[in-house]
Amino acid sequence: MKLFRRIVGLIALLVLSSFPTMLFAQESPLNVVGSGLAAPLFDALVSASGTNPELATEVTGSRIGIERFCQNQAQIALTNRGMSDAEAAACVTNAVDYVELLLGDEAVAVIGNPADDFATCLSQSDLALGFAPSAQGQITNWRGLNAANPDLNLSIIVPPNDSAVYALMDSLIEGDGIRADAVTQPDNAAIINAVATTPGALGVVNWSAAFAAGEQVKILDLTSAEGVCVAPSASTVESGQYPAVQRFFAYVNDDVVARQDLAPVLAFLGTADASTVIEAQGYLPPAEDLLTQNASVIENLTLGRTFSIPPVVFTIPPGVVGAFTIGGDAAGFNYMQDMTASFQQTYQGVTPTADFEGRVAGARRFCNGEIEVLTLTSPLTEEQLANCTANGVTPISYNLGTQAAVLLVGANDVNEPLFCLRAEQVGQVWAARADGLPTNWSEIGEGFPDLPITLLVPTSFSESTDLVLSSSTGISDALRADVQTQGDPLYRAASVAVVDGAMTFMSWREYLRVLENQQFGIRLVRIDNGNGCILPDINTIKDGSYALTRNVQLVVSQRALNRQEIQSFLWYIFSDENFARLDLNDLHGIELSELPAVREGLQSEFDAAVAAAATPEPTPDLTATPSG
């Protein structure tokens, strides 16, 4: 039916091409929806094509634009990302066929003052430390990004919040927007000038503007998902190595591809002249082979995703069935309970069972082949690994992120000795002790103030409570009894801000809520675990240099990876759609941009496990050997 409709359309187009004036008069406006960042670029390309189709453009954002496009409510959707699997499925459900065309790339360059001697490669954690909303009032010195940096005041300089550069930077860091105390400049030129004339400045601009600035500024490398330092360039952007990139697409309903007022515009997207226009707009034009691919899409009417289709092939079968058991450390219980409930609600044929008996019992059952999935906060011991090997169980680990607890005190000068505590002093303050509890800070050590110790806790049995005690004492110790229980972290933060000598703890996520509430008069307690006073932030949490942390690993038996229900559960965990559940369960340090590489690794592991299961065990050679 589609083929017949296309043939009829082409015949009609040939007939009507003799009457262009009548045709244009009869054509209705094309409804264009989607990204407000991609729309100006598309308008510039339309104008340069020499054709003037009537466009009714509405800025809706990429998500809503694609949704309306796949409901056949618009003929063109402009986006600053590729269409997801779920969105593509919606188009299929509604019988909306389309072509996908690449418009160009936006890359952000992070720039610094060339006279400053600081680390020239920033990780995504460094970006979060410098630019995230949680950094406001906390990270004000370059040493807050990296202890090896000079003692230099840090100034963050950004473009307006309606710019493409701002939007892309926001997508790279946790939280909504960029820290509120950043200095906003109106355009790239003003940002470059401010960075060039301000010691300690760190700014973000369009990549082409950064290169045009020459030696006025220092362009910093960013680490890729593999942890490799990558400089912004045309090649690293096109290859996907450089992380600070967003890609602009146009999705066009195939019913209008051949319209005489639109066809020249689409054909123009495959030409070298289009590259000139894209570059003039400050974007990186597609490489020559991608321009050729644009032209091929239109010439051959190649339907569906051409540029954004994921490189991996695994999909969760809707009718997947099976059962498996998860056990191990209680630190992973809340997250796994959340994930298994959500997974089973969607895939009712699978029965996951959570049986958390603790690390020792969980490791024993895993290595005995009794459970398939294990959560751990420290690696398996040599003895446990030997047991696994003896039973033919090969453990494969996946990082779920790091949990952290932070201590808060009032920012008053009288509390200054509390601003940094040794790990053992944390245990001395919070843990129950048979030899008597300190009730005054002067009992903790020389130089501590003569103030009553006032302690506020969420509950006696929270994950943060266990984390504070186990990390500071080395054992799962009991919490002292003379504490005040208050479940609301905002209330606890407000209390310590006004009571000298008061202290509370909370998860990192709860602390970010406190910051968003703009609570003043509080101070994060740094922890000295033998390497100096370490401030808790997303970087020190991720690398474990901050003491009150524990990394959570998901361990799976390799031979279980050939089972469809195990594959599906792992794929579900590491899907983009479920990324937010990590943060909701206080697991931090994994970036959304890392998930495609995780899934690519999963695909390889699945393929290897299936191939191994299909390979028969070698049989001994039973051929008799003649005796002499």
Image: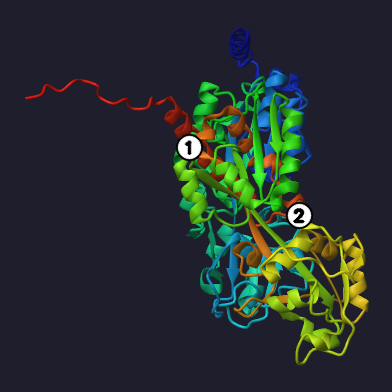
At x 45%, y 28%, the residue is 613
Which quarter of the rendered picture does the C terminus lie within?
Answer: top left
Above or below, 35 relative to 181: above
| Amino acid bearing label 2 | Asp
Question: 223 or 458, which lies in front?
Answer: 458
| Amino acid bearing label 1 | Ser
**Residue located beneath label 2 in the image:** 162
Numbered mark located on residue 604 in the image:
1
Separation (CA) of disc 2 from disc 1: 40 Å
Q: How many discs mark residues in the rendered view?
A: 2
Residue 574 at what x, y percent from top left? Answer: 63, 42
Which quarter of the rendered picture does the N terminus lie within?
Answer: top right
Q: Is residue 265 among the parts visible in the rendering?
A: no
Question: 26 or 170, which lies in front?
Answer: 170
- Tell me: 457 left or right of 88: right
Residue 585 at what x, y percent from top left? Answer: 75, 51
At x 59%, y 42%, the residue is 365
Above or below, 27 relative to 176: above
- Tell me: 294 left or right of 318: left
Residue 493 at what x, y percent from top left? Answer: 88, 69
